[in-house]
Amino acid sequence: MNEVVEGAKNGHYIDSLLDPEQQMGLRDGFREVIYSSSMWRNSERGAEKIAAWLLTYGSPKDGCVGYTLVSERRPGSRKYEIELYMVGVRKDCQGRGHGRKIVQFFVASSPSTLKLYARCYPNSQAMFFLLQEIGFVLVSTTHQGIRELALCRK
C-alpha cells in the first residue's frame, strides 16, 4: 500500500487514493482479490464487480519486489479482455528493470487470444514508454490526459 500511496502522490494513480478511506477500500479490494479473485471498482459505468488477480514478483531472498494487479476490462470479459490495472515496484528496487520484467512476464504468460489493455496517467511517462516498447499502442486519450493502450500482437 505504501507504494500505491506514493504512486498516487506522484500522479501515477488516481489522486483519490490519497484519501485514507479510499486507501482502506483499496486494501480491502486487494484482500478480496487474494481470497476470491474479484474486486469492486468504480468506473465511468458505475460500481462494478470484476474478476481480478494480484500477482507478486520477487524471490525468497529479496521478498516481494513488485506486483501487478490485472483485471477484466469490463465485467464478464475475462475470457477475451484483460487490463493491466496496476504495476508497482518497491521503492528501493526501482530503476533496475523490475517493472519491465513484470510487464513482459504478464504479456508472455497471457494467451495470444486475449486482448490486453493498460491505462497510463499523465505523470506515468516511463510506464507509457515501456508499454509502447513492448508493443502496446495508444488507442485514445481521455479529457483528463489518461492514455489508453492496447497490445498489438504480431
Image (spheres, helix red, strand yellow):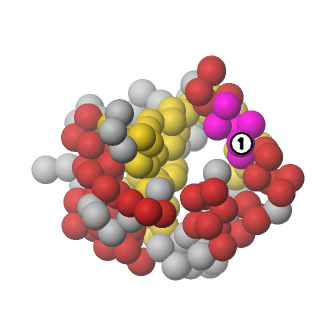
Residue labelled with disc 1: 27
Magenta run includes residue 1: no
Q: Is residue 33 above or below residue 65?
A: above
Depth check: give the residue in front, 112 or 36. Answer: 36
Locate residue 93, reporting x and y percent.
Answer: 38, 60
Give the residue drawn at x 71%, y 46%: 26
For the residue carrying disc 1, how many other residues have a C-alpha within 10 Å: few (<14), some (14-19), or many (20+)? Answer: few
Comparing 91 with 18, the one in front is 91
Residue most extreme to the front: 61
Q: Nearer the viewer, residue 32 or 71?
A: 32
- Residue 13 position, x and y percent, is 60, 65
The region drawn magenta spans 26-31
Say left or right for 147 vs 50.
left
Give the residue drawn at x 52%, y 79%.
123
Residue type at the position of mark 1:
Arg
Q: Position of residue 59 (x, y in %)?
A: 33, 37
- Place residue 56 in its image quadrant: top left
Decide whether the magenta segment is chiefly helix, strand or loop: helix
Dot 1: element: helix
